[in-house]
Amino acid sequence: MLAAIDQHRDGLFELSLRIHKNPEIGYEERQASTWLATFLEGAGFRVQRGYKGVETAYRADAEGKDRGPTVAILSEYDALPDIGHACGHNLIAMMGVAAAVGVRAALDQLPGRIAAMGTPAEEGGGGKVALLGAGGFDDVDVAMMIHPSSRTLAGRTSLASNRVDIEFTGRAAHAAAQPDRGISALDGVIQAFNAVHAMRLTLRPDARVHGIITSGGSAANIISEYAAAKFSVRALDRQYQQEVLKRFIACAEGAALSTGTTLKVTIHENSGYENMVPSSPLADRWAQHASEQGLQVMAGAPDERMGSTDMGNVSQVIPAIHPYIAIAPEGTPGHSTLFRDAAGTPEALANALKAAKAMALTAVDVLADRELLERAKVEFEDRRKEGVVRGRMTS
Ligand SMILES: [Zn+2]
Ligand SMILES: [Zn+2]
């Protein structure tokens, strides 16, 4: 199995670098999804492009010798606007494909099935949320993927999150001759930012509310008629995150009231990211395999820095893991040019290949070792009863 991954090494590295050099943002990853699906087809997988009606998603299946569990190995491949692959999803893409190719080489001796899934638009567009809603994970028992980072960690959690747009409409007027006839939409946005800053004092330390102004008006001599901002609202658990979201909307409403503007709030569909709850038996198993592959797996700190991921939504429904591997010097910020450049280095590719081998070994364990899968399912069921995870939605 590991030899099969090594045999594909050059092709896998080339694929990852090609995606790195051709960044495409969420739901526009037409080249990346095509390249990955074609690679998997060439490696003997049965491929569905545009999986569940999501254009840049795919699913590539390979069957074992008998019926058994289905393990999904996920790839992400979207880039960030302007800055490119500063989250290193070109490596996630490669690790998913590499691990799937490895498991397939051993499938003639295993029960069950491997599903290599291409999940687009992780950076806010919620490809996995769309696929979950369309039943894309209904036949999946466990899911796994690996994310690049500056530290190697088996089981870090993530923040629950929403993306929210706020738009203010005022009235245009000459800013010098008739300013008193105008209503400033920009002031609505500025007041909203100030209200959010004031609110921070009484937020829990894990809450994150951050935004950018996407429109402030069109000219300095026009009282701005339209202004808009985009925000992320996050916290460690969904319940508190929803409370912060309510308070955030109240900040925007207060800003509209005080400036006389009208407000439109849009909470983006598919942007509701749940907090990640990693499966401990599976995360432990990956950590063990990763150490054997020569990766130095660290223990997570209690105040671990984290973002959000739509893999959180998957982990709320089935046992799932989302380990991190170091591809840049410790402390290198994510979403930075430094991190983007690191994601294309030979060292990053070499580490990613080791991590992918550990994921392939973990997937094989799930198929071969019924006791491991059982432990993952029992833990998940206990957590569901405690309200830590949601479980599958029953319609
Ligand atoms: Zn990111
Ligand atoms: Zn990412």
Image (cartoon, rainbow, N blue to C red):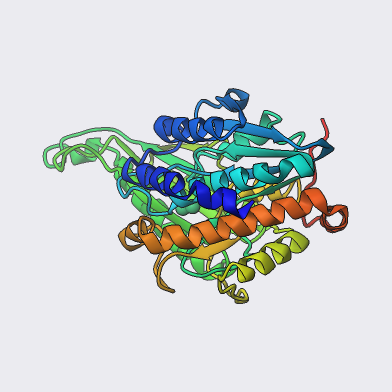
Left or right for 135, reference 196: right
Left or right for 309, reference 150: right
Residue 51 vs 183, above or below: the answer is above
Left or right for 205, reference 336: right
At horizontal 46% and vertical 33% (from top left) the residue drawn is 27
The image quadrant of residue 257 is: top left
**Image position, residue 73 (x, y; %):** 63, 45
Seen as rendered, the residue at the extreme left is 177
**Image position, residue 199 (x, y; %):** 50, 63
Residue 3 vs 269, above or below: the answer is below
Residue 353 vs 393, above or below: the answer is below
Left or right for 86, reference 40: left
The image quadrant of residue 289 is: bottom right
Which quarter of the rendering shows the C terminus?
top right
At horizontal 51% and vertical 25% (from top left) the residue drawn is 55
Residue 351 vs 50, above or below: the answer is below
**Image position, residue 262 (x, y; %):** 42, 36
**Image position, residue 388 (x, y; %):** 78, 57
At horizontal 39% and vertical 59% (from top left) the residue drawn is 194
**Considering depth in this image, is 361 or 231 the residue closer to the camera?**
361
In the rendered image, is residue 307 in sight? Answer: no
How many callouts does the rendering have? 0
**Considering depth in this image, is 200 or 150 the residue closer to the camera?**
150
**Considering depth in this image, is 237 or 353 the residue closer to the camera?**
353
In the rendered image, is residue 202 in sight? Answer: yes
**Considering depth in this image, is 285 or 205 the residue closer to the camera?**
285
